[in-house]
Amino acid sequence: MADKCFFCSEPILKIEGKFSGKYFEIDGKGGIHEECHATWKEKNAKRCLHCREFIASTPGKFSGRYYSLEKGQVHEVNLFFYFFILLFFNPNFIFYFLFIFYFYFYFILFYFFIFYFLF
């Protein structure tokens, strides 16, 4: 009796048009068909916090490089956008924005009046 693929539960045998008979051995789980392996990796891979796609090398899209953050992982190309979203959807952002806006507004207003009246 042939071993079964732990992903699709089909026997690990060469079946023309369906399975090549090649398989991978995964520690603690058993064997998996070569044809099932890519799908299994995709379903079990860690996801990017920004785009929710799996962290892996995808030709023409992702290099496979990523950054590990406190909450998870982010693709190298998505790092800027992830921090942009964190910044603008942070409840404290409005306070930072108003502080900086008023600081620069009064700073510019102050120097405008000084130069206007002195020169």
Image (spheres, grey):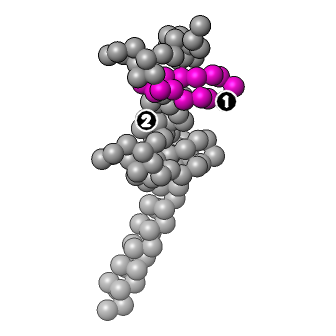
Q: Residues within 10 Å of mark 1 (few under 14, many from 20)?
A: few
In magenta segment, residue 110: no
Residue assigned mark 2: 53
Please report the bounds of the magenta region as a residue range. Answer: 22-35
Q: Is residue 83 left or right of residue 18?
A: right
Q: Please tell me which residue lies in front, 29 or 50.
A: 29
As drawn, 110 above or below 61:
below
- Between the residue at mark 1 and the residue at mark 2, the CA separation in whole angstroms equals 25 Å
How many marks the image carries: the answer is 2
Q: Is residue 43 left or right of residue 18?
A: right
Find numbered disc 1 in the image and state the secondary structure of the residue it sits on.
loop
In magenta segment, residue 25: yes
For the N terminus, the image quarter is top right
As drawn, 15 above or below 53:
above
- Residue 45: x percent and y percent? 53, 33
As drawn, 53 above or below 81:
above
Residue assigned mark 1: 27
For the C terminus, the image quarter is bottom left
Q: Is residue 39 visible?
A: no
Of the residues under marks 1 and 2, which one precedes in the sequence? 1
Q: Is residue 53 visible?
A: yes
As drawn, 23 above or below 73:
above
- Residue 11: x percent and y percent? 52, 11
**Kind of residue sitting beneath label 1:** Asp
Q: Which residue is located at x 58 percent, y 49 percent? A: 68
